Amino acid sequence: MNEKVETTWNGNMAFEANIDGYSVKMDALPNFGGSNYGPRPKPYLLSALAGCGAMDVISILNKKKIIPSEFRILVDGELTEVHPKYYKNIVVTYELKGVNWENDPVVLAAVKRAVQLSVENYCGVNAMLKGTCNISHEIRILNF
């Protein structure tokens, strides 16, 4: 299976990518010749990592009938200092909320297993990145 993305220049440092029929904008900051028309490309990579892992985790939890009331993924990427700048360290934090979840060992075990399966078996973005940088994963179970 091949996937294709078309990216079109919109002047200066602004670009627009077409991904599966959806428009995604990118631009540089003004001090790099851009107009801040959209986000920079490297954070999209972090977003792809978050989305890939999130879809895996929520799918696995749904199968176990463990449905969070809130779920978000925070990704912190540390860039190298010199060019070409790339992410040398990435921390992915999974935050889930549910009623009486904070001290529930069944929920914590299920979430840990879902993250483990995503990281080790399912998330292709994680698989691509793990050979190029350090990726760590944290879980926060929050209560109402």
Image (cartoon, grey):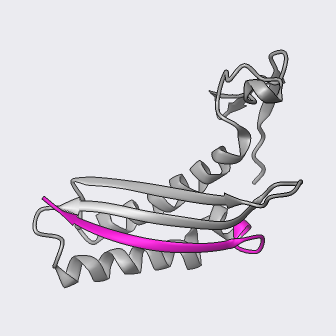
- Residue 139 located within the stretch drawn in magenta: yes
Left or right: 110 in relation to 114: left
Circle count: 0
Picture quarter with the C terminus: bottom left
Left or right: 75 in relation to 124: left
Q: Nearer the viewer, residue 109 or 36?
A: 36
Q: Residue at x 78, y 27 (%)?
A: 31
Q: Nearer the viewer, residue 45 or 79?
A: 79
Picture quarter with the N terminus: bottom right
Left or right: 64 in relation to 27: left
From this viewpoint, which residue is outermost toward the top? 11
Residue 95 in which image quadrant: bottom left
Residue 3 location (% of width, % of height):
75, 46
Q: Residue at x 76, y 74 (%)?
A: 131
Residue 63 location (% of width, % of height):
31, 68
- Residue 49 located within the stretch drawn in magenta: no
Residue 109 in which image quadrant: bottom left
Q: Residue at x 80, y 16 (%)?
A: 10
Q: Is residue 43 above or below residue 81?
A: above
Residue 23 in which image quadrant: top right
Q: Is residue 42 above or below residue 95?
A: above
Query: Is residue 73 in sight in this rendering?
Result: yes
Query: Is residue 15 in sight in this rendering?
Result: no
Q: Nearer the viewer, residue 16 or 92?
A: 92
Q: Is residue 118 above or below residue 83?
A: below
Residue 47 location (% of width, % of height):
58, 49
- The residue segment tinted magenta is 128-144
Left or right: 77 in relation to 85: left
Q: Residue at x 40, y 64 (%)?
A: 94
